[in-house]
Image (spheres, rainbow, N blue to C red):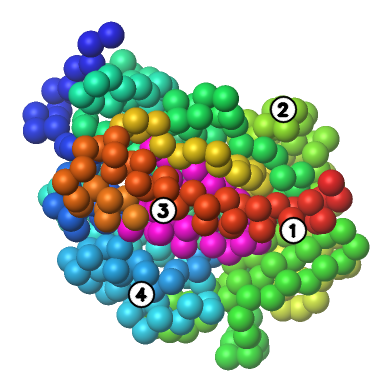
Amino acid sequence: MSPHIPTNEPNPAETLIVGGSLGGLTTALALAAQGRSSTVLERTAGRTQRGVAILVAGADLLAALGPAAGRVVAEALGRSAMSQYALPHAWWDVYSALRSAAEADPLITIAEKANVVEVGQNASSAWARTEDGWTWTADMLLGADGYRSVVRRHVDALRPAADYAGYVVWLGESEVPASFRGRIGGPDFFTRGSDMLAVYPLIDRAGQVTRFGWGWFDPHRNGLFRRLGALNGTEVMRTPRTADIPDEVFATMADAGERQWDEPWRSAVTEAFRAREVIATPITEYLPDRVTNGRVAVLGDAAHAQTPMTGAGFQEAVADAATLADVLGGEDAPEKALQQYELVRLADMRRRVAGGQSFSRSFAGR
Ligand SMILES: Cc1cc2nc3c(=O)[nH]c(=O)nc-3n(C[C@H](O)[C@H](O)[C@H](O)COP(=O)(O)OP(=O)(O)OC[C@H]3O[C@@H](n4cnc5c(N)ncnc54)[C@H](O)[C@@H]3O)c2cc1C
């Protein structure tokens, strides 16, 4: 096939990035800080939230983003709040900050509703074909397309899919009741039987904690998620839409929450289930053998999906972005630079995923 360049892209970018969430945006910004242009292909328009609470290693993130984008992000998240590594930021705050910085950068183009269905490469370029029939080309292609990565299929055809970790996490975000303000410490974890509730106080731009994110780790829903088509064998097919989950499941969860958890978390959790304001996320893990194939590489969850118990998914994506910017900043050809990326990052990626797998095996009883 002969790849063509979409007409809306008269001056094609040097890099294609598939996926415009936290990993893809951070990578685009880190490359821009080195003077490298990119086009980000994102299948949705608007947000595709994964997680409610994101731990930001402020100094690492700012170093990866460079001064211009770093200023935008620090202004949005609050410089002093960013230095408090113990407290996570709301997912949406981190996404909005990165997205604003990317939109302000002339080296970055974001194409939405660009659902990539196939990627490939030849001796001089890499390409992505989107569902609407366009083929986009560039010097190289980076897959930041999450746990069900299309790009991973090209990078490691023998092991294209991430594995289901054996449990789902019900995610919500709630207000800290006024009577508990100022009395909330760091993230906390509570277990009852085989369930676990993780609570994450969220730091805002002003350094205040008025909201918290929570995740209820639940190993009992495999049958339900299979019936909903979210699971097939050991593979997670998708995150089910809240609308598809039967009312009685929400009612059962609300009743169990009432019995199991203590205040102030109990009211927040049960109210969220009664209002169906919960995202059910089947957890996946991917222990990579390789993250590069020629001019194509994967990063973030596409490269090393891990349980949120590591608390490090974003931190690892930032490390990927910083390393990619570093290796691509030299004189090497893309293939050589991406080989170097794999050499530098693969062992750490594997260590982090394997650490999470130990937790998952004991939690899900596998
Ligand atoms: C329940 C849960 C809780 C988490 N909690 C934390 C935490 O506390 N701390 C932390 O650091 N990390 C946490 N994480 C992980 C963290 O969110 C990710 O590791 C990090 O944001 C990097 O994600 P990503 O951008 O690589 O992938 P994703 O967030 O999955 O984004 C992938 C993007 O690619 C797009 N995409 C996918 N396929 C295509 C395609 N074919 N074409 C075009 N676009 C496509 C998607 O729409 C999406 O925007 C959590 C994850 C989960 C699931």
- Frontmost of labels 1 and 3 is 3
What residue did someone put label 4 on? 59
Counting residues from the start of the chain, the first of labels 2 and 3 encountered is 2
Please say whether residue 358 is visible from this viewpoint.
Answer: yes
Instruction: Point out the image quarter for the N terminus.
Output: top left
The kind of residue tagged 2 is Asn
Q: Is residue 53 left or right of residue 41?
A: right
What residue did someone put label 3 on? 344
- Frontmost of labels 2 and 3 is 3
Q: Nearest the camera: 17 or 281?
A: 17
The kind of residue tagged 3 is Val
- Frontmost of labels 2 and 4 is 4
- Frontmost of labels 4 and 3 is 3
Residue at 61% across, 37% down? 162
Compared with 179, 196 (above or below) is above
Residue at 40% across, 81% down? 83
What residue did someone put label 1 on? 359
Number of numbered discs visible in the structure rendering: 4
Q: Quarter of the image holding residue 7?
A: top left
What are the residue bounds of the magenta stretch? 297-322
Q: Nearest the camera: 344 or 81?
A: 344
Compared with 246, 72 (above or below) is below
Residue at 55% across, 39% down? 289
- Frontmost of labels 2 and 1 is 1
Residue, far top? 1
Q: Residues within 10 Å of mark 4 (few under 14, many from 20)?
A: few
Q: Secondary structure at mark 4?
A: helix
What residue did someone put label 2 on? 232
